[in-house]
Amino acid sequence: MSEKYILALDQGTTSCRAILFNRAGQIARVSQKEFTQIFPQSGWVEHDPNEIWKTQEEVLQAVVAEHGITFAQIDSIGITNQRETTVVWNKNTGRPVYNAIVWQDKRTIDICEELKEAGHTDLFTKKTGLVIDSYFSGTKIKWILDQIPNARKQAENGDLIFGTIDTWLVWKLTNGAQHVTDYTNASRTLLYDITKLEWDQDILEILTIPRTMLPKVQQSSSGFGEANLKGHKIVISGIAGDQQAALFGQTCTMPGLAKNTYGTGCFMLMNTGKKAQFSQNGLLTTLCCGPNGEVNYALEGSIFIAGAAVQWLRDGLEMVISAEETEKMAEKADQRSEVYLVPAFAGLGAPYWDMYSRGAIFGLTRDTSKNEMVKSTLEAIAYQTKDVLLAMEEDAGTKLKSLRVDGGASANNYLMQFQADILETTVERPEIIESTALGAAYLAGLASGFWNKEELEKKNSIDRNFEPKRNTDEVEKLYNGWKKAVKRTLNWLKN
């Protein structure tokens, strides 16, 4: 009998990937391709939905061909996606009415301010677990309906539909047969009541979004329809937003377990179980997955710019050729350097939630070199993580004994050691750092019967533990410098 695989589609902010996982939960093959980042104005970030689909389709075809198997050997498909990024398209023609507005986009700041001034802050937070911020999908939908000619009329006629990227991919994979999402992605839209588990009519009316635009919501590990790939019908049986997928991939399915993903942004989630726990410290409450893929709750701290800061060093400043070389450059840097980079290129996320912050560098001296700049960029990722962890520990009333990590930048040993030092706790890096794709695969395989719950619980294996090495006084001095730097970037755009 031919070996079977799970096909995970990992649709990220800068690239599309397709990954084949074998029955042992190991990566058999990866195909990846970047796509275009569109910046029409300062603070605006867009993607072409059709290019995303074309790129995703290319890599899923490539990974199967390159591994020398057929689509008949694919047991099921799992999808994980950049969250909050918003697509609105005509359900009759399948054509988007506008580019996808990316989660990093800041064009709806004025809409958010109007909502706050109208006194809606508490209502939105109580129902959705989120804050009113341009980060989330709701105000992006409103902008499209308000700004694109004829869009609102088409939406009111029932011709336009909305989806996060998972919904868009399922629509394309099923040739328009399925307009669906899962609980985790729905919980990031600013439109979904996370305690009642339904789209909230009050919020839809406030944002003037027709209910007919919204997809059906279902459990993350369940049947989302069938993809028709070269004549083979393959069930799509797992979907989760990238961070919840990573939490599941790290098997953080019980209350108190936490992970941090180092991707374009940086996202720390802690599973809090069956009950929603609302933060007093600037964190979000969101939906995640329990051991069987069922609805659980999590506290989340969202850092907007992490790996994107390294990408900026590479593409914007041309200081590095590749992300991989930053580890050695940071090690070569003067370790006494007190240069701080605050990468608030898209404002600051948790626990600050300041849309008006902008990036800044502090402590430059005449002898500052590229190495010190690289070092400060990596350290900024770790400092932001500490900001979130402290807030999470206070909300949860407990100190984390260790932090599980994943994502591309977790392969950087300098960053991981500094992270352990600044947190003063153990950092655990698994053998497979592709936890996002792995979580999507687990969810798909759980629903299809490819794996069972007991098998998944045994699959988490550690590659390396990073133990803190710096003393508390040094850590405190370094972190105080970071807090001083952040303070000076707050409200930069406000008079």
Image (cartoon, rainbow, N blue to C red):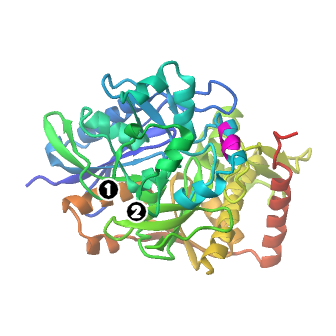
Residue toward you, 472 or 281: 281
Assess whether residue 114 is covered by the magenta stretch: yes
| Circle 1 residue | 441
Q: Return the mark for residue 355.
A: none
What residue appears at the point 62 percent right and 47 percent down from the top-left corner? 325
Disc 2 residue crowd, few under 14, some 14–19, many 20+, Cα 10 Å: many
The answer to whether 88 is drawn above or below residue 362 in the figure is above
Answer yes or no: is residue 247 visible.
yes
Q: CA distance from mark 1 to mark 2?
A: 8 Å
- Highlighted range, magenta: 111-115
Horizontal relation, residue 196 to residue 26: left or right:
right
Residue toward you, 157 or 409: 157
- Can you say which quadrant of the picture contains the N terminus? bottom left
Answer yes or no: is residue 346 visible.
no
| Circle 2 residue | 249
Labels 1 & 2 near each other (Cβ < 8 A): yes
**Chief SS of the magenta region:** helix
| Residue 466 x/y as whole percent | 59, 71
Amino acid type at image mark 1: Ala
Assess whether residue 212 is covered by the magenta stretch: no
What residue appears at the point 78 percent right and 78 percent down from the top-left corner? 472
